[in-house]
Amino acid sequence: ATADLIGLPWQVIVGPRGVAAGEVEIKNRKSGERETLPIAEARKRLGIAA
């Protein structure tokens, strides 16, 4: 995958149920750990400005 080639540390998984609930799943690509968070919290965690 392209994310592997360029070394992105996080993967964001967005699905229809998560969008309806206002949530996304983030995955740490190094550890494989996954966490479901509200979109605003995921943005903070990943350092994405509003």
Image: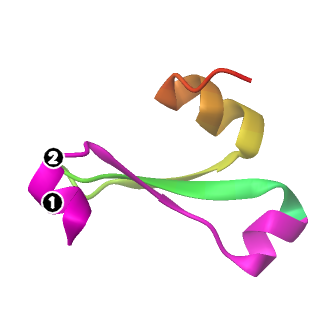
The residue sitting at the left extreme is: 5
Bin the neighbour count of mark 2 within 10 Å (Cα to Cα): few under 14, some 14-19, many 20 and up.
few
Looking at the picture, does residue 19 appear above or below residue 46? below
Query: Is 27 colored magenta in this rendering?
Result: no
Relative image position of residue 37 (x, y in whole percent): 65, 46
The amino acid on which the numbered mark 1 sits, given as a three-letter code, is Asp
Quadrant position of the C terminus in the picture: top right
Relative image position of residue 29 (x, y in whole percent): 24, 53
Q: Are marks 2 and 1 in contact (CB under 8 Å)?
A: yes
Instruction: Name which residue lies at 88% across and 69% down.
Output: 20
Q: Is residue 20 left or right of residue 9?
A: right
Relative image position of residue 23 (x, y in whole percent): 74, 55
Relative image position of residue 28 (x, y in whole percent): 31, 48
Q: Which residue is mark 2?
A: 7
Q: Is residue 36 left or right of residue 30?
A: right
Quadrant in which residue 42 is drawn: top right
Residue 4: numbered disc: 1
Secondary structure under badge 1?
Answer: helix
